[in-house]
Amino acid sequence: MKRRHEHAPKVSFLSEDAELNDDGPSESDSELEDALWKGGDGFGENDFSELELKPDHANRPLWVCDDGRIFLESFSPVYKAAYDFLISVAEPVCRPANMHEYVLTPHSLYAAVSVGLETSTILSVLDRLSKTRLSDEIHDFVHECTENYGKVKLVLQRNKFYLESNDPKILKELLQDDVIRAARVAGSANASFHVSHALKEKGAQKLVDITEAEQGDAMEGVDMHSFEIEARQVEHVKQRCLPGNLGYPTLEEYDFRNDTRNPDLGIELKPMTRIRPYQEKSLSKMFGNGRARSGIIVLPCGAGKSLTGIAAAARIRKSCLCLCTSSVSVDQWAAQFKLWTNLTDAHIVRFTSQNKDDFPPPDEACVCVTTYNMVSAGGKRSEGSERILEAIRSREWGCMLLDEVHVVPAAMFRKVIGITKAHCKLGLTATLVREDDKVDHLNFLIGPKLYEANWLDLQRDGHIANVQCVEVWCPMTAEFFRKYCDPNFNNKKQVLYCMNPNKFMACQFLMQFHEQQRKDKVIVFSDNIFALREYATALRRPLIYGDTSHAERTRVLHAFKYSNEINTIFLSKVGDNSIDIPEANVIIQISSHAGSRRQEAQRLGRILRPKAAQLSGKKTNADEHNAFFYSLVSTDTAEMYYSTKRQQFLIQQGYAFKVVTDLIGPQDKPQLMYSTQEKQLDLLAKVLSAGEAEAGEEVLPEDEDAIRQAHKPVGAARRTAGSITALSGADGAYLEFDAQRGGAKKKASFQRASGAPRAVKPKNSILRERDAMLRGKKKLA
Amino acid sequence: MAPARDAATASTSAADGAFVAFLCALAPRELDALYASSPWSALAVLRACDSIAKQIILRLAYVDDGADARECAKWCGDGASDARALERAMARLARLRVTTALGEGEDARVVANEAFANNLRRALERGFVNLDDGDGADAREDAGVAAKVPDRATLNAYAKAKWEDLLLTLTGASNAFSRPGAKVKGRLDAQALFRAAGLTTATTAALKKGGQKRLKNAGVTAEGFAFLLQTAQEQIWVLLTQYIRDSQKTSATSAISFLLRLTFQEPGRAYAMTGVLSDTEQDVVLDLTHLGLLYTFEVKKKFYYVPTLLASGLSGGFTGDDGDTKAAAAAAEGHIIVETNYRVYAYTSSAVEMEILRLFTRADYRLPNLYVGMLTRESVQNALRAGVDAEQIVGYIRAHAHKQVRRKKPSVPSTVCDQIRLWARDMERMEAEECVLYCDFPQAGTFYGAVVSEAEKRGALLWRDDASRRLTVRASAHDEMKAVVGALKQKLDAV
């Protein structure tokens, strides 16, 4: 507790002018340690053996340590209830099969309060579930963190803003402040507060019910006191309320049922649409009190994030703005809307550099699907774009869906949120980890985390595929390793371990095994373009990377999905996020982006979509794997270190990586390529003669290029490097760009978008570098 | 204590179990004396044998002049594995001096040890009752005595607490045993016993006086760490072996004989001591009480002892490959859950269990009834360096798996076990070998090539660099190579 007190309960509430350091990824990739992995030597201050054990402790599922750490037995009969409660008050640290760990943090408690849990409820439920008596430290900590949170709400009702609280004293206290008094709508001055009857928190109540015999429905609802404030002053009022000023951070809620000014959207879920229990649970947190609150929902890839978002939009039934990371996913979201709801193209507006659908008249509600970049890009925009942007700006959005929130930097969010007027913001993501630890910002830009599903539970219930994760150790051949250790080839290290002949053979072996023996669909991932090209060419399989044209991509993906001829495709990191290939069930990863935990999780997500057998309701054996994730690692190279680091996130979710040291038996070896020393030496020569730029990791140019292109005169044949990448979803996907290439590249693509002065320059350094490279290639040719 | 004998004990115990290993380590004369002393020894040996060996003993016990070796071969199945099992059983019996092979080839015969056969027959014929010459050993009739016998749970708790204290003394975390008589009156010096058994080094005691409590500094040897991960039964035998070696030669046999008799006595029942047991035996009782194997009390100036569960596990059964130990382990209440993320949760408040876990895990949290640790590369390799081997760690966490994970197969995630082994393998990747560098060969000529091929032929070549004309040769082959090189040189010079 001592340690925590130093920081707690300081929550970094971001004010609008707070310094945000989103220039690029934090360099200290390796310094960011997992809470679990930095452990003490000996118990030291983690010795809580003095805590008093309750006599009936065997029946209770958890321990609460003084430092906020919670251990939960997942085999307890009340596990499900305890899980739902814990996930709303604490941050999960790891959730393997038998024992989960959580930690109480100021953020998590803030989230708990904002979904309607009160301080006393949090403590009493915790106490009821705990095997030990809660210590005073925990009591103090929870009190300190929750005292002022959630007491004041900023409610948008009938298009008027109200500050609302169930305790009139707090409102009076707030009115002592000049700013707030000035913001109060004149005319109502000195008058008493509006008193309204609010619905009881249903979502939160459910959490408590399961552990407690209800004390009767005495509290059917609560009286809420409120006063109106001027719309123009909302930002100032919010600012005044932050800790450090008045210390009552406001929760934003949208009373959509009573919103009469904005037109309703005639959106209905199709009758065949089934909402799964965990999706229902996350929605119930969002709509707990009959209003819509902003926040983030965390569900694994393939577990139906889009349906959750669409269901939320369908409940609000107002105009909906959906922001994605790439134009490919814009198409996918639009298709999802059409799939699950009765909406047609007439009501779905797509806004990308290729698609600029027209908006319906302003008095008609609609769904708009676009990318973050399209909305936030600065500089001069094409006429069409400008028109649509204006439409987006002028509309009042009932709900805003933010896809893959983890990839977008805070500065960009602020820009987007500043441009658009949305009552309720729902962030969706699978992996709330960022190597740069910027996740906390999301808490206050969008809202608290509303729900986070447990991967293993979903897997057990058949909502996501049962994946076998395997790390294949491929020893470096002597020749490759000698060059790897040679300081003269420092810049070739990566390509050397990617092109390790043993790795190549492992890849070929696995690919053939899955194609022929199991009739699987295989994706091979490589961040290294040289390796990707070499592998794909040698194995005669199609590949997709940044420079692949849109038409080519579509063709290859279509063939992969529907043809029996093509069972393997090679993807660069453009395939990490958005390409939706539900058919694939095997991933072979030959090179990856350093130690990115998120990339590992995202890639795994490509094959997590439940497989046909699971969906048809066939009871599959719980231990039977139906998807495979292979990570090929060259031993004794930097890859070993990276791979351990990359796996952390998944391991904490309960995945186990099986290490295979001898994949290829001697009898298989002769059939594989590069099995003879002669061929290996040829390969080595090829690797060493490859250009430096060529041999590096894929560098994807920036997205706004596509936007600029959009207002170039159409028709003239042009070939701009990387214009297609805007479609790929690759851009901005990994802001923690590789450390090896240093500074210039680290400038995240969104920086200029956020309106930094640098934007005046027509092309940035990366593009120049790239052009130079292309010119060089041409010369060679 | 001859270290050679320790090594022998250790090497056989893997296959034979602690008890058989112990007997094998006794001198032939002592063994013969032991078999002659009482039927209990014969029965204990019989019990400790696997089924084939049991069959052989029982058959041979009734043929005075032994059986034809080829006849013996027919006593079990025809398969190759059966033949191997038979061979193993025969070898074990021979080591135990229960049987002796006479003659060779056609005349080969197997004969049972006479004293052993006599005692075994006696036990079988009497139906296992009244095997002792004295009477009144069983004192349960006495109401006053019965009242004093603790109930099973108390007795178990007593034995467990005693044993844990003992182990903690070993690790240096407790001093219950370092001051003799502090807790229980007894003359047994546990520290001396540990030292003699090679589990701790002589400096331990000195360190302890300085208040040194940390495990790492306690002077526990590699054997000591390995010892901690063994089952209680194995631990008892290691200590008793040492105990018996320490006692005078004359009393050793009778002490063993008494120990073996103990193993057939029922835990939780009182047996009279005063007036029944010899002085040596009474001393043994006192020492065993000190270790927690027995519980003693006094009624009307007469002493009685009650064997605890620890004592009953003494001779166990055959531990090689039949179900006995596995069944015992399954029955035991496990406390460890190992997760796929290398977290180790142990439901325990026992100091010794925590000390053992700290051997190979990084201790992170301690709660009233839970230990939370982490298997890290560092922690495991520390343990490996301290002398524990990977299989022992894996075996320990498997044997103590919590009932919750025991239901699943495997009870410990296979990825974790593999990783522990990989960590162990990691430490063995580097191998040092003494070698001699041969250099300064003439730049031209075939001399270098000839030396290389000679070295290669002898398997002595470790490394060569043709560019600089250098090679290294195994040091052990250096003398031989010297001669070869000399001869080659002469030959070349001659040309």
Image (tube, coloured by chain):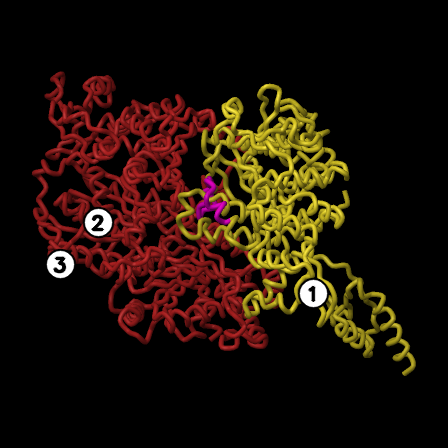
* Residue A424 versus residue B482 in the image, above or below: above
Of badges 2 and 3, the one in the foreground is 2
Which residue position is annotated with label 3? A345
- Give the extent of the magenta segment: B326-343
- Give the chain of mark 1: B
Q: Nearer the viewer, residue B238 or A175?
A: B238
Q: Chain of mark 3?
A: A
User: Residue B171: x percent and y percent?
Assistant: 63, 34
Of marks 3 and 1, the one in the foreground: 1
User: Which residue matches tag 1?
Assistant: B109
The answer to whether mark 2 and mark 3 are in CB contact below 8 A is: no
Q: Residue at (62%, 50%) from the top-left corner?
A: B120
Residue sitting nearer the eye, B182 or B30 = B30
Q: Residue furthest bottom?
A: B495
What's the chain of the residue with tag 2? A
Q: B342 or A480: which is nearer to us?
A: B342
Residue A185 vs residue A512: left or right?
A: left
Residue under numbered circle 2:
A276
Chain in yellow (letter): B
Q: Residue A316's x, y, as percent? A: 14, 43
Q: Which chain is red?
A: A
